[in-house]
Image: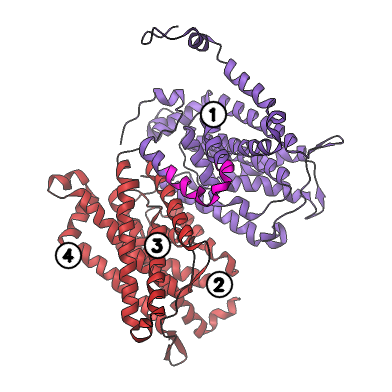
Amino acid sequence: MSLSLLSNPEVLVDQVVNGLTIGGIYALIAMGYTLVYGILFMINFAHGEIFMFGSFTGFFVLSALVQSGFAERFVVLSILTALLGAMAVSSLLGVLLERVAYRPLRKAPRLAPLISAIGASIFLQNVMMLIVKARMQIYPDVFPEDFLELGRFSISYFQIFIILGSIVMMAGLVLFIRKTKTGKAMRAVAEDKDAAALMGVNVDRIIVVTFVVGSCLAAVAGVMVGMYYTQINHMMGFMPGIKAFTAAVLGGIGNVAGCMVGGYVLGISEAFSVFFLPAQYKDVIAFSLLVLILIFRPRGIFGEVVSERA
Amino acid sequence: MVSHRNPGSSALKHAFRTAPSWILPVGLVIGLCVLPPLVGNYWTHVLAYIGIYVMLGIGLNVVVGFAGLLDLGYVAFYAIGAYSYALLASPQFGIHIPFWAMIPVCVFLACLGGVLLGIPVLRMRGDYLAIVTLGFGEIIRIMLNNLDKVTNGPKGLLRIDPPSIGSFEFSTPTHYYYLILAGCLLSAFIADRLNNSRIGRAWIAMREDQDAAALMGIDVLKYKLLAFAIGASFAGAGGIIFAARQGSIFPDDFSLMVSINVLCLIIIGGMGSVTGVILGAVILIGVPEVLRAVALYRMLAFGALLVIMMVFRPTGFIVSSRRKLEFHKES
C-alpha cells in the first residue's frame, strides 16, 4: 500500500464507505458502554461478550432458516427474525449480568465490579466455546451480493444496509432518551440516583432498562458483523469491545451523540490506516488513538472530564 | 499472651502466638528447599511454574496493591524481559550473552518500559488506567507477532541458551526450581522492605487519597512512576527466568490472560500481602494445572470464581495486616 493510492478517487471512496460501515457498528456497541457508564460509572467489560452472544444467536437463527428453505423466499423477514432473536438473547444476558455480577457490587470499592466484569466476560466466552467447540463458524449467506453503481463508484447493498441500519438504531436511541418518559428517568438517574429515587423513579428498573437497551444495540451490531465478515468465533467479542470502548471515550464517555462521532472517527481512521501501515497493525490504531485522546483531550470530543474522576 | 476471649486455647496455640515472627517464613523456606526430591519431577515443574507467577504477583502487587494503580498491561514487561533475553542469547542474531549478565539488562529494559508507559498515563485513574495499560500490553503483543525480522513473528524464538555456572548448566526442573525459588525470595524480600519504607508509606497514602497525599507534600507523579518502574522490573526478572526455563518463547505466551491471571491471583489471595500472593498463585495457577483432566471447564470455573469471589469476598482470602487496620469508606 502506498500514499499514491490516496489520489485514486475510487479507492478513496471505497475506504470512506468501509470506514462508515465499520464505524457505525463500533458506534452501536459503544452505545452500550456509554449508557452503562453514564448511569453506573463502571465500564461493562463483558459488553463485548453480549455482542458475541448476539452474533451467535443470529447465526443459529439464520442457519436454521436457511436449512428449512425459509430464508430463500423471505430474505428480509429472515434477517428481521435473526435480529429479534439476537436482541432477545442478548438483553436477557445483559439483565442477568447486571443482576448477578454488578448489582451486589454497586456500593463496593471500584476494583470489585471491574474484576467481576472480567470474570463474567471469561465465563461467557467459555460458555460459548463449550456450545460451539472453539471452531470458526461461517455465517449463512442470505444477503444478495449486489452493488449499487454510481458512475465510477460502487457500494454493496449490504454496506448500505449496515450504514442505514446503524443510523436508524442510533436515531431511535436518541429519540428514546430525549422524548420518552423512561428516557427522561434514565437521564435523571444518570444525574443523581438518590434524587431520582426521591422523585419516584425506580432506579433498579431504570438500570435494567439501560442494560436491555445497550444489549439490544450490541446484538444488532453482532448480527451485522457476522454477516459482514462472514466468520465468527467465541473470542470475537474482545477486539470490537475494546474498539467500541475507544469510540465511547473518543466521543466523551456518557455522551450518546459523541459516541456516534467517536465510532465513525475510529472506523474511518482504521479504514485509512491501510494506506500508511501494514494491515496487521490495524488493531494498534484504536489503542494508540485511545492513549492519545486520553492524554491530550481526556474529556473526549464532547464529554466532560472523566479520566481523572475514575 | 493467651487470648481472653477464648481462655481454653491450647498450649500449642499459645506457643504459636508467642513464637518469634521469623519462625514461620524461615520454616516455609526450609520446607520449600527440601521439596523437589520429595515430590518428583512433575510437581517440581508445577511448583516452578507457580513460582514465576508468585514473582509476577509480587511485582504487580507493588503497582496495584501498594500504589493503587490498576495495570492490565503488566504482561508487556514480562514480555520485554523474556524477549530481550531470547534475542540476545539465542541463534536468532547469533549473539550469546550469558544469563547472569542479562539479568540486570532485562530488568533495566522492563523498568524503562514501565517508565515509558507511566509517563503518558500518570493523570489517569481507575478504569481508564486499566484500559490504557491493557492497550499497551496488546500493542506490545501485536508487535511481537508482526516484527518478523526481529522477533521471528508467531514462529517464536527457539533454542534459547540455558543459564550456566562455570561448566554446570541448568537443565532439570529441579535446577530451575531453585533458581525460581531464589527469585521469589529476593522479590518477596524487596517488596517487604519497600512496603515498610518511606516509599511504601507514600504509596499507601496516595492509594487512599491522592489529593490528601499531595497536600501532605508527597510528589504523587514521582511515586506513581516509581511504582510502575519497580513493578515492571519484577516482571522483567520473571520474564528472563521464564525464557531461560522454556528454552523457546512465542508471542502467544504473552497474551492478555497473563495480566488478568496475575491481577486475579493478587486479588483472590488478598491484596497487599506476600502470603496472599503465594496463596493466590497456588489456587489460580496450581489448581488448574492439577485439574488438566477437566481442562475444558477450567476457564469457565475461573470466570465464575472471579465473579463469586468479588460478590462474596472482595478483599481476598488473606487481608494484609495493615489493610485490616485501614479505615475504608464504602463509597
Residue A11 at x, y percent in the picture: 52, 82
Q: Pointers 4 and 2 in contact (CB under 8 A)? A: no
**Circle 4 SS class:** helix
Q: Which mark is residue A36?
A: none
- Indicate the amino acid at tag 3: Phe
Q: Are marks 3 and 4 on the same chain?
A: yes
Q: Which residue is mark 3?
A: A53
Q: Pointers 3 and 2 in contact (CB under 8 A)? A: no
Indicate how the structure is coloured in the image. by chain
Distance (Cα) linking label 3 and label 2: 30 Å
Quadrant of res B93: bottom right
Q: Give me the residue at 32% from left, 68% from top.
A: A85
- Indicate the amino acid at tag 1: Val
- Indicate the amino acid at tag 4: Lys
Comes first in the chain, label 4 or label 2: 4
Q: Which mark is residue B274?
A: 1
- Indicate the amino acid at tag 2: Val
Q: Start and end of the magenta stretch?
A: B288-306
Q: Which residue is mark 4?
A: A179
Q: Give me the residue at 22% from left, 53% from top.
A: A206
Count residues near mark 2 (Cα–Cα under 10 Å), then give few for <14, some for 14-19, many for 20+: some
What color was chain A assigned in the picture? red
Chain ID for label 3? A
Chain ID for label 2? A
Q: Which residue is mark 2?
A: A274
Q: What quarter of the picture does the N terminus of chain B occupy? A: top left
Q: Are marks 1 and 3 on the same chain?
A: no
Q: Give me the residue at 68% from left, 46% from top.
A: B82
Q: Nearer the viewer, residue B117 or A74?
A: A74
* Front tag of 3 and 2: 3
What color was chain B assigned in the picture? purple
